[in-house]
Image (cartoon, helix red, strand yellow):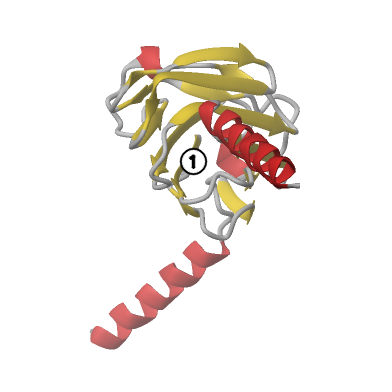
Amino acid sequence: MTLRNGVAAAIAAGLLAASPASAVVISAVVGSPDNAVTDFSTTGLASFDLDLTSLSTPTTLTFTLEDGDVGAPLAFNAILRNLTGGGMDHVKFLLRGTTFATLGTADGFSGPGTVSGGGAGARIDLSPPEFLDLFVGDPLGTGSPAINWSIATTGLTAGDTFTMQVAVPLPGSLPLLLAGLGLAAFVRARSRT
């Protein structure tokens, strides 16, 4: 009896492995090696966590569509964890190969973000700046339709890819501070000559 059960389990596992996959997956990540991405995508859902320890380079994720992901829009959720020690003033999302079907909400520990854009681009402005986590869409699975984001799959087929670039520019005050320090150093150096 155990040999028969073992053979049946092996056949079932082989059939499962041979069947086509049906969930969108992150197939590549390009950007700062210090920023870690965890893929939580499933059938009909593009979802990830992005741990930001560096803001110097945008993170670009390549998603590959599989059988169950074409025809209807993909729900989109993300958690951006700010591990930089500084505040995030805004976040930009840029799609290539598709567009956003809907833009939902974004919420952080500092308060809700203001979402703008459409088509291939979206921007979340944060005031006050976010020093901890930013929730984009419904990553905690509350089911509220008011917070959902979605990505269009019209014209795409299984095996097609699209990319999403996530950019968190340095806070607006930091470049001004750096420019001011540079100017002060220049003036000081000139006054010594």
Residue drawn 49% across the image and 30% down it: 76
Residue 160 can be seen, yes or no: no
In the rendering, at what x and y percent does residue 46 appear? Answer: 51, 38
Q: Pointer 1: residues within 10 angstroms few (<14), some, or many (20+)? A: some
Q: In this view, does 11 lie above or below 112?
A: below
**Based on the displayed image, in which of its 4 quarters is residue 185 positioned?**
top right
**Based on the displayed image, in which of its 4 quarters is residue 20 positioned?**
bottom right
Q: Residue most toward the left?
A: 1
Q: In this view, does 73 lie above or below 16?
A: above
In front here: 187 or 176? 187
In front here: 167 or 12? 167
In the rendering, at what x and y percent does residue 2 appear? Answer: 24, 85
- What type is the residue that disc 1 sits on? Thr
Q: Mark 1 points at which residue?
A: 43
Residue 142 can be seen, yes or no: yes
Residue drawn 63% across the image and 27% down it: 71
